[in-house]
Amino acid sequence: MDKRSGNLKTNFTEIARELNISRGTIYRVVNQSPLVAPETRSRVIEALNRHGYYTHRRIRRSRICFDFCEFRYLKEMGELLMKRLPESEYTCFRTDHRKNRETFFNTAATCDVAVFCSIPEDSLLEEVHKINPELFTVTLTTESCADVTITPNNKLGGELAARHLASLGQKDIAVFLSDLHPTRMERYKSFIGEMHVLSPDSRITPIYHHDGISFTYTFEDYFRTCGKMPDTIFFPAGYFAQIFWDEFASKGAPYDQIGIMSYDHPEDNFHPFDRIEFQRQHILDWAEYYITNRPMMKKRSPVHTSVGVTLVTAGSIKKKKG
């Protein structure tokens, strides 16, 4: 029998007494012996999870598929996470399912874990689970049917942004939405819902920026047609707030009169804006935890872990008079 290497504080004798079975049956389950009835195996797995015992042990080097995309933030997150995993225990493979779907599926078929830094569609996750039913899936973006999704608390973040702007009397607000990114849309929906509750007469105007169109052109076209300058522009992805500052607001009037509200992690805050802030480190900590402590699951039930967000004020939005 293999040496037990899960949570060594778990008391197998107590679990055996609780389930009215022998300790040997528990050992057979954690060592994946076929000599256990399915119903008994399920009862043991549930009890082990309740007692904090994780049976996915690193008996061999785990194989991890990191699926990337072109979004800078997600690429950086994936690279940082890969560096955290010791090479002696993990073998990492890079894919991009949008560029080469076949390579992605072939790689995922032989891996233990797939980490998506690529905003996967649920249909892709369902298909890869059919190819490799044992694959443990983790996404670092928006809600999904992956085993684990880790994101900032986008609902709360949007609400905090709305409360801040409403408290400053901001009523004419533009929101910059790039490529209809689902994470940014989560923040936008939460923001607009809270604004309409707190300030029903406010005007919220989305600015849609599409692939293949320059950032500068998108804003020039918006300012040509908006009629009246907004009080504030909310950027659900803070990287674009920096670009707006560099290309417009820093050049003076009339753009320097527009308030800027950002949403980002501290590493991307080159210019001090009022912002919703989250710690990238917290997302990486949780991702590493789930990869190294995969729970044994009776059934797949997606887990969504939301890391905390806070409001940081820096004076980029002034209180409206009257």
Image (cartoon, helix red, strand yellow):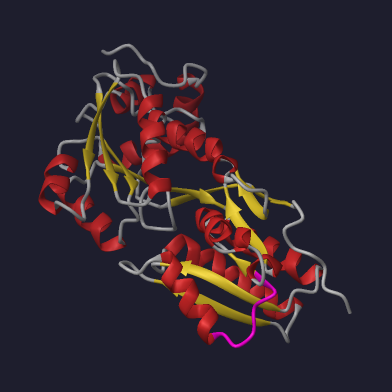
| Farthest right residue in view | 322
**Where residue 74 sits in the image (x, y, percent)?**
39, 46
- Whether residue 215 is situated above or below residue 98 in the rendered picture: below
Within the magenta stretch, is there residue 230? yes
Magenta range: 226-232
The residue closer to the viewer here, 85 or 268, is 268
Residue 87 at x, y percent in the picture = 30, 19
Image quadrant assignment for residue 120:
bottom left
Give whichever of 162, 246 is nearer the camera: 246
322 versus 286 height, above or below: below
96 to the left or right of 100: right
Residue 140 vertical placement versus 191 (above, below): above
Q: What residue lies at 59% left-to-right and 45% top-to-bottom?
A: 269
Q: Residue at x 48, y 75 (%)?
A: 220
Depicted 28 relative to depicted 76: above or below: above
Residue 247 is at least partly visible in this image: yes
Residue 296: x and y in percent read: 36, 36
Q: The N terminus lies in which quarter of the figure?
A: top left
